[in-house]
Amino acid sequence: MKIMNKSISIFATLFVALFLFSCGEKQTLKMWQIVDDSQDVTNQGQGTVDITVLKGELQKAMTDEKSSVISTSPHGYQYTNSNSVDVFAGYTTVSKSDFQYGPALFHTYQWPNGYYGSACSMGPTSALYNTYTYAESLGVPEYKALAQIIYAQTALHAVNSAGCVPYEDNRKLKVSRPLKYSSQEETYNLILADLDEAIKTLETVQPKKEAFIDVEGDSYDKGDAKYAFSEYRWEKWVQLANTVKLRIAMYLAKPNPTLAQQVASEALNHSLGVLTEDFGPTYKEGITAHPYHQISAQKGGWGDSHMSASFENIMKRTGNPLIEKFFDKNYGEVKCKVTGQKTKALTDYYGIRQGTNVGVRTQGAGYYNFSGISVSFKYERQLWVCKEEVIFLKAEAALRWGLGGDPKALYEEGIRSAFAKYGYSAKVDSYLAQKEVVRQKKAGKFYDIHYVDIFDANNNIDGRLNICVAWDDADSDETKLEKIITQKWIAIFPNGFEAWVDYRRTGYPRLFPSVQAWQGVPTFPTELQLRRIPHDESDENILLYDLPNIETALSVFGQPGENSGGQRLYFEGDPAEYPYEFETGEDNPRLGWPIPKNF
């Protein structure tokens, strides 16, 4: 059976044009120069689609190195993750301002910014269109279910980054402007409906192994790959859908706690439950490299991203040994431009504060020599979801609603799992037993571990994490949540999308503020930190057509929406109940710090 299909090449062209590559030709065209406003999915050329086409397009949606749920190429990952969300999540910081084939990035609070749009991309929409539209009539409803689950994840990345997205118009491949934008609340509801439908379909059809080989590839079946997506199990796709529902439940915890508990309960009490294993692209051990190594490593890589100051300080104050798994010590000597003090190569792990104006990079000097991704991380598997994230999601559900088990047991299970994954099980018991923040010993005395920028002492700042690792039932729920989110943040490294959501919705972990204020208009307090990536108004389609719909979709809790970096988001909760508050008092060591409120 064949079905007439509307051509979607125009959207593929659009996506490629918007997807800039740091080592490819720099793009200068605006959206209006690429797509004529009169072009719409309803008047494009005709083609045919059959099951073979669906299989090929669905496989592309799952595996495309630039536009799947997570980019698997270094170029793609740099634009979707490491130059934006991973910085805002407190994992890494860009260590250069001069990109040979891309726009400048003098510091990561610079706006407008040509690197941030890809973090708000809806992903492989065009490759999912035929599957979503025709799979049922072609007798393969299970493929529509997979398309729904994939689209849910890419849409969540986009809406949690931008605050609103053209969810339905994007899926229809609508090009003519203006587009209808869905708010975060609306998008969550649309995604939940898609996920419920997908789960029901897979439970009904229970597709055979062969149906998944056609879209997941046969490398795992042949024994060439160690892991590959679901390993041809429909049950694992259902668990993935339930896991995404559990994520959404946490996004809803503050704005709609009743619905949040209902969604979490549905996910956890489902007969198949949530994921108990990692889920991600095909992985060949010792062959499939993580893109971060190419982006970050000084030897064999580009040296473009380095460890963040927040990650350095939190790992040191918790005494977490995984820092040596994730990052290398400083590659070379660094001379402080303020004090003149020299730090020898391989002295320690050193990160860079976000918002630092790194200037034009000099190879072998300054920030170039700070800690980059470790060579031991090179062949770690890239994931859509790691099982440690799921364990910590369950811990939060247990803390908030008494669902899924005991919060203490799940908290410790999540830490143990992360240590075991990287071969550090021998150190986990002592880590879990720590009842104080780790301090540094010098000349027989102990000192608090603060952040020291060994290249520019003007960026030095006191450490902010003041919780220990050990669980204490006597702690407040707020402190327990801080422990859960902080250890989750470490365990899911480098999943910047989820880590940035957690920081904005809970206030944890305690990240350092940006060195420089946001350069967009209007700005916002640096202690508040970036809430969302604005839609780029230098794009004429946004400025001339879409902006009113964007601002309407950004309206939350009766407050008008504004296309700004400081715009409050839905998952932060009603400001009447969860206002932005900051520490006060001249003698207060936490003067100006945000005060998280989650209960």
Image (spheres, rainbow, N blue to C red):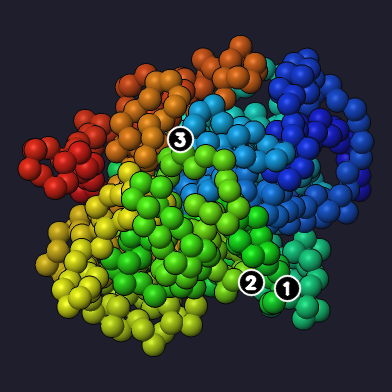
Q: Nearer the viewer, residue 368 or 18?
A: 368
- Is there a contact, CB below 8 Å, between mark 2 and mark 1? yes
Q: Is residue 166 above or below residue 218?
A: above
Q: Residue at x 60, y 45 (%)?
A: 80
* Kind of residue at disc 2: Tyr
First-in-chain label (2 vs 1): 1
Callout 2 secondary element: loop
- Total marks shown come to 3
Q: Is residue 93 above or below residue 385?
A: above
Q: Residue at x 66, y 60 (%)?
A: 301
Residue 207 in view here:
yes
First-in-chain label (1 vs 3): 3
Q: Residue at x 74, y 52 (%)?
A: 64
Give x and y (percent) for residue 22. Answer: 69, 43
Q: Disc 1 marks which residue? A: 287
Q: Is residue 210 left or right of residue 533?
A: right
The CA distance from mark 2 to mark 1 is 7 Å
For the residue carrying disc 2, how many other residues have a C-alpha within 10 Å: few (<14), some (14-19), or many (20+)? some
* Kind of residue at disc 3: Tyr
Give x and y (percent) for residue 190. Answer: 53, 39
Q: Farthest residue in the front direction? A: 340
* Kind of residue at disc 1: Ile
Q: Disc 3 marks which residue? A: 109
Callout 1 secondary element: loop
Give x and y (percent) for residue 102. Answer: 68, 37
Callout 3 secondary element: loop
Q: Disc 2 marks which residue? A: 379
